[in-house]
Image (cartoon, rainbow, N blue to C red):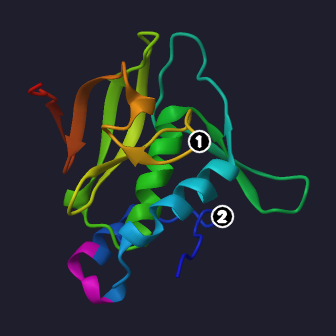
Amino acid sequence: MFKPFFSIPTPPQSHDLIDREPWLNNDDPTNHIGDIFLHVKSRFRYERDEPGQDIWGNGRYENKTLGKGQVLVGDCDDFSIEILKQLKLHGAKSKEIALVICKTTKGQSHMVAAFHSKTETHIFDNTKSKVAPATDPQFEGYKWEYMSKNNKWFSIILNR
């Protein structure tokens, strides 16, 4: 069952604990990727970083005026980091998730979150209306550049 954790900021230690003690969360995140995406997207408001400053993970939470809880205000990296947090809280292992730096069709640098299921890689992009595999037409023209795995960054090389 999908359990939203968005309004409660969780320290990184709980993510590590789930990796060390998988019995704490036996949920399969593959069943919830659409719900996680929609939940985070519905509570996210895009706000560009100050000119000349690209600060990762400095999104802030604000109370919504309609009584729907908190909203995360930030840019693409804040959205992607929140997606990874939600995936971890729903049972994803560290080896299944990644931050990905890419260029959009307009040539702008952008960050998305990725979840590697048994069959494909799902991309969570704050500019899109749905989570989809990296091969989906909505990502046509994207240039995948770097991916983080276990706190290390790797270049992405695609064989076509």
- 10 Å crowding of disc 1: few (<14), some (14-19), many (20+): few
x, y (%) of residue 15?
35, 68
Q: Do the residues labelled 1 and 2 touch (CB within 8 Å)?
A: no
Is residue 8 shown left or right of residue 134? right
Rendered image quadrant of residue 115: bottom left
Q: Which residue is drawn at 55% across and 63% down?
A: 35
Relative placement, left or right, of 50 versus 30 is: right
Residue 129's disc number: 1
- Main SS, magenta residues: helix
Q: Which of marks 1 and 2 is nearer the N terminus?
A: 2
> In which quadrant of the rendered image does the C terminus lie?
top left
Residue 142 placement, left or right of 69 = left
Q: Mark 1 and mark 2: span between their CA atoms?
A: 21 Å
Give the foreground label among 1 and 2.
1
Which quadrant holds residue 152?
Answer: top left
Q: Which amino acid does label 1 sit on?
A: Ser
